[in-house]
Image: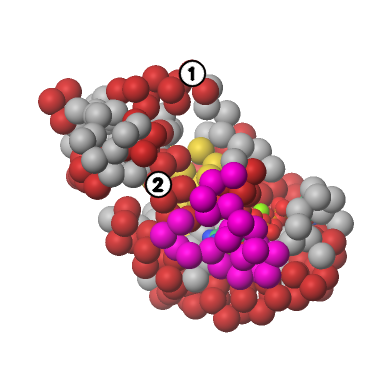
Amino acid sequence: MPVSKKPIANRKRKRHMLPSCRSCSTHTRCLLHEASKQQIWKMFTTGIPLQEKDGIFPRHKAPFITFVLGGPGSGKGTQCAKIVETFGFNHLSAGDLLRKEIASNSEYGSMILDTIKEGKIVPSEVTVKLLRREMELSDNHKFLIDGFPRSEENRRAFEEIMEAEPDVVLFFDCPEEEMVKRVLNRNQGRVDDNIDTIKKRLKVFEALNIPVIDHYAKRGKLHKINAVGSEDEIFEQVRPIFAAYQHEAK
Ligand SMILES: Nc1ncnc2c1ncn2[C@@H]1O[C@H](COP(=O)(O)OP(=O)(O)O)[C@@H](O)[C@H]1O
Ligand SMILES: Nc1ccn([C@@H]2O[C@H](COP(=O)(O)OP(=O)(O)O)[C@@H](O)[C@H]2O)c(=O)n1
Ligand SMILES: [Mg+2]
């Protein structure tokens, strides 16, 4: 699955420009600090660029947020790669960020690993912090947030912490049989790509993710896509959605 193509040097430069914080010992932890968050999100939500005196490099564009939903193996990651290529979004996969956290031996690593093996949902606070850090570091204001929110708890945590809502929500609708087949053939060495975990994940999807999908359908934000067909056929359903928003998202 593709990760951000942003050069590392760029990330370091941005971190360095963030305000130093009396409560935190490093610039990285400072990203999670309330004051920094409020400044960035004040600008994100009002669209008013920050001044140098605000302590962070001025940005000029409000974020354009897309949530990408669908069951395990429905093709979210595959279609996100195509959207990135065609429309230039920053792809943030919640699952990839959690897996990176495991690989980096973070304090949450073993809890995340156990949760993923069980097909359950990691506490929202952890996932939203990871997403927030990536969004704060991004030079790109167009975000594809893949595999999130997976529960009403995820959704509410994002809204509260980020003080933002998605502009667009995509739902890749795929029959269970097809999802199971795809996951079992995925071949990426994932600990959760086995029949036991996939069965649990499908139950969790029905119980926790469908209510989120219903929520956005009621709010008129949901774009339901038939996820059966070739990758290109599916992308031809996705393309017009972003083409219609292209002016707004620029
Ligand atoms: N339209 C498709 N038809 C068949 N296989 C697909 C299709 N789209 C993706 N796949 C394959 O299915 C597997 C799951 O796709 P992925 O994009 O990882 O889904 P998700 O992120 O929703 O779990 C991958 O091996 C991928 O190559
Ligand atoms: N918002 C999220 C996203 C993923 N996850 C965890 O990460 C696992 C893999 O998510 P993923 O998005 O990479 O999975 P796919 O739908 O791509 O197969 C999920 O089954 C959850 O255990 C989570 O807890 N919360
Ligand atoms: Mg995925």
Q: CA distance from mark 2 to mark 1?
A: 19 Å
The spot of residue 57 in percent (x, y) is 26, 25
Rendered view: 17 above or below 235: above
Q: Can the viewer see residue 181 in this picture?
A: yes
- Quarter of the figure with residue 208: bottom right
In the image, what residue occupies the spot 34% across and 44% down?
Answer: 32
- For the C terminus, the image quarter is top left
Determine whether, in the image, residue 53 is placed left or right of residue 190.
left
Q: How is the image coloured?
A: secondary structure
The spot of residue 238 in percent (x, y) is 60, 52
Please state the quadrant of the image where ligand 1 appears: bottom right
Rendered view: 122 above or below 163: below
- Quarter of the figure with residue 246: top left
Which residue is tagged 1?
Answer: 9
Q: Amino acid at mark 1?
A: Ala
Where are the magenta residues, as a range? 105-126
The spot of residue 64 in percent (x, y) is 39, 45
Q: Helix, strand or loop at disc 2?
A: helix
- For the N terminus, the image quarter is top right
Which residue is tagged 2?
Answer: 132
Q: Residues within 10 Å of mark 1 (few under 14, many from 20)?
A: few
Q: Helix, strand or loop at disc 1?
A: helix
Query: Assess mark 2: CB under 8 A from ligand 2?
Result: no
Q: Is residue 237 magenta?
A: no
